[in-house]
Amino acid sequence: MSAITIALGGAVAASTAGAARSTSGRSVAKKSAVQVSTRNATVCRVIQDVTSSMDVGSSIDTDAEMRRRMVQMDTAKTLRKTIDAMGGTMIQDPAAFVSTDFQRAVTTGLFASCAALVARGGVGIEMAGDGGDPAAWASLVGSGLLAYWLSDLGTGVFHWSVDNYGSKATPVMGGIIDAFQGHHKYPWTITKRQFANNIHTTCPATMCVTVPLLLTPGLAPDTCAFMGVFCSMIVLSQQFHAWSHMKKSQLPEIVVKLQDLGVLISRKGHGAHHRPPFEGNYCIVSGWWNPILDDNKFFNKMEKVVFEATGVAPRCWSETHDFDVEEEAPEGWGKEYNL
Ligand SMILES: [Zn+2]
Ligand SMILES: [Zn+2]
């Protein structure tokens, strides 16, 4: 009972922190937040002292967890209200950016199937008695590199299609289309998503390719390696994309190095996609294909073919992009989940 009262006290204090923020500015909010955690820390000490001679360890854990959740829920609710009151912009729910067990499972399944495909390529060389032949292994590695190079082109075509055609209401692809199109107004959201949360959307469809391939008898080792690398790059491209939207200071050193070397799409390379005329730079693995496709007006030609065949014009022919782009997350957004 006392624990519940204490938990409510913590939640009220957090709520006060939010209220102070909305009326008196950020510095006040910061100070109040510190007061909340200090208060809870004190409370924890008192409980532990009282029960230290009793065998109720598990109930202490439960109470602490409940207190933590109540404070967290209340802080999130207050922050969302504050953000809404500040600008009237779309409210993004931070809870929707946290990876779920399902998202982790589907992501793990996809990468396991890709790894199994590459491994099958190696096993295939051994089984064929070519294990000692450097040319066989060079061919396998070459297939992987070719897949990496072509995956950039694959993401370009895919990105172009979901940016320009369909809507949230489109069957099967609606969610992905909505996410890509919304990304142009809220580029910051991609930088806040946890790993599995960000990349899981393409995993089920990609597994529809990798799993049947794994079960197909008689595949050449090079084909296995190519498809394993290609499919994993297609899925990972969404993470490379997220990194290209982040500041260098927010990224691991190795990622910055790979971006600088041109192995991964750079901030500058992808930034051009978000600037007028908004009709190119769709590739998001390495970006090597962007100048090739854009200089040759590849997508423009594709758009004309689609228009002549179906009468459907791409969004980039008419979209004005006259909305305010939110480059940065609202101050304090997602803090309760360390986003
Ligand atoms: Zn786009
Ligand atoms: Zn982007």
Image: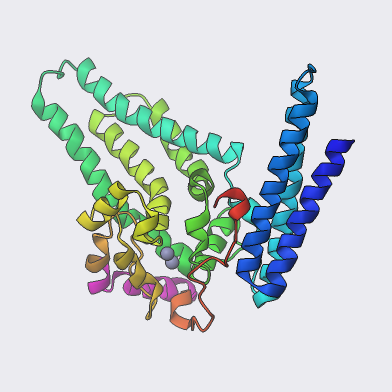
- In magenta stretch: residue 150: no
Give x and y (percent) for residue 257: 24, 52
- Residue at 80% x, 27% y: name it: 50
Which of 74 and 282 lies nearest the eye of the viewer?
74
- Residue 38 vertical placement versus 90 (above, below): above
**Percent coordinates x, y for residue 51 in the rendering:** 79, 24
Reply yes or no: does residue 311 show up in magenta.
yes
Q: Which residues are magenta?
A: 293-312
Residue 40 relative to residue 3: left or right: left
Can you say whether 134 is above or below 33 in the image? Answer: above
In this orientation, which residue lies closer to the viewer: 335 or 54? 54
Residue at 50 percent across and 50 percent down: it is 198
Which sits in the foreground, 144 or 63? Answer: 63
Q: Position of residue 308 (x, y in %)?
A: 42, 76
Label tally: 0
In depth, the one of 87 and 272 nearer the eye is: 87
What secondary structure predominates along the stretch shown in magenta? helix
The quadrant holding residue 307 is: bottom left
Ligand 1 - quadrant of the structure image: bottom left
Relative to residue 277, is residue 221 drawn left or right? Answer: left
Which residue lies most toward the right here?
A: 1
**Residue 286 in view in this figure:** yes
Residue 73 percent location from the top left of the image: 73, 50
